[in-house]
């Protein structure tokens, strides 16, 4: 059985074919995308040079999804990302993006837990389906990234949750973000 805690090693041959070292077979970008959606981290290395090509292939996967109309990144965000490569802001952008996704995952997880478990709304028909849809959306949006906080649906115990006076503000911001995202999807 494969160890899902360590990254799945994919080797790229000179022919540009990608080889899964765990299952000893060739894989496609779509296969790699599926591994990531399933919560698995991957590492893609060039067999000849030993260079880590993971970032390059993850960007290629995102570009393919965007080109097929599965847009997650609004145009203004893409413009800002391009702009950040040409300014001194590049040092803060990665940390900001990581923190933003972590806050989004944690906030959504708490809201969904509260909606489905702690209120009468959770008993309404269709709430479980809505929760599953939201979890799938978050998993797709974050690419199944692990190590940056809890994934949606993963409930935290009340003991390890810090008291947050700004929880109402976070919920409001998250609701506004979800509303903007749903408008973008139309």
Image (spheres, helix red, strand yellow):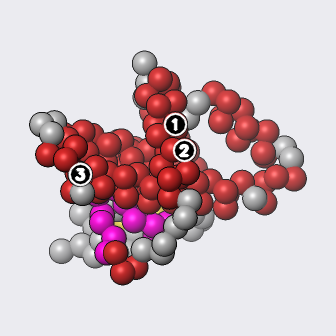
Q: Which residue is mark 1?
A: 176
Q: Which mark is residue 173?
A: 2
The alpha-carbon separation of the residues under discs 3 and 1 comes to 21 Å
Q: Which mark is residue 119?
A: 3
The alpha-carbon separation of the residues under discs 1 and 2 comes to 5 Å
From the viewer's perspective, is 20 left or right of 51? Answer: left
Query: Residue drawn at (18%, 74%), measured in percent from left and top?
Result: 1
Do the residues bearing badges 2 and 3 touch, measured as CB atoms within 8 Å?
Answer: no
Q: Position of residue 136 (x, y in %)?
A: 30, 45
Helix, strand or loop at label 2? It is helix
Do the residues bearing badges 1 and 2 touch, measured as CB atoms within 8 Å?
Answer: yes
Query: Residue drawn at (75%, 59%), measured in percent from left and top?
Result: 92
Do the residues bearing badges 3 and 1 touch, measured as CB atoms within 8 Å?
Answer: no
> In the image, which is nearer the foreground, mark 3 or mark 1?
3
**Is disc 1 surrounded by few (<14), some (14 to 19) or many (20+) residues within 10 Å?**
few
Q: Position of residue 74 (x, y in %)?
A: 58, 30
Helix, strand or loop at label 1? It is helix
**Is disc 3 surrounded by few (<14), some (14 to 19) or many (20+) residues within 10 Å?**
few
Query: Residue drawn at (78%, 45%), measured in percent from left and top?
Result: 84
**Is disc 2 surrounded by few (<14), some (14 to 19) or many (20+) residues within 10 Å?**
some
Image label count:
3
* 16 inside magenta stretch: no
Name which quarter of the figure residue 152 lies in.
bottom left
Query: Residue drawn at (47%, 40%), measured in percent from left and top?
Result: 175
Name the quarter where the C terminus is drawn.
top left
> Between 97 and 170, which is closer to the camera in this rendering?
170
Of the two numbered discs 2 and 3 on the same chain, state the one appearing first in sequence.
3
The residue segment tinted magenta is 145-157
Of the two numbered discs 3 and 1 on the same chain, state the one appearing first in sequence.
3
Q: Position of residue 177 (x, y in %)?
A: 52, 38
The secondary structure that most of the magenta stretch takes on is: loop
């Amino acid at each position: 059985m494969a160890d899902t805690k360590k990254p799945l090693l994919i080797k790229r041959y000179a022919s540009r074919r990608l080889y899964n070292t765990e299952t000893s077979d060739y894989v496609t970008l779509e296969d790699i995308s599926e591994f990531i959606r399933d919560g698995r981290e991957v590492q893609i290395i060039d067999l000849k040079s030993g260079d880590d090509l993971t970032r390059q292939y993850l960007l290629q996967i995102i570009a393919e999804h965007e080109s097929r109309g599965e847009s997650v990144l609004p145009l203004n965000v893409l413009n800002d990302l391009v702009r950040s490569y040409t300014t001194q802001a590049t040092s803060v952008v990665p940390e900001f993006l990581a923190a933003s996704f972590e806050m989004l995952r944690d906030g959504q997880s708490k809201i969904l837990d509260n909606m489905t478990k702690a209120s009468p709304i959770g008993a309404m028909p269709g709430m479980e389906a809505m929760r599953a849809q939201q979890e799938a959306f978050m998993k797709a949006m974050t690419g199944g990234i692990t190590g940056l906080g809890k994934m949606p649906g993963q409930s935290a115990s009340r003991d390890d949750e810090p008291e947050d006076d700004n929880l109402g503000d976070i919920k409001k911001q998250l609701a506004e973000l979800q509303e903007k995202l749903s408008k973008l999807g139309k």
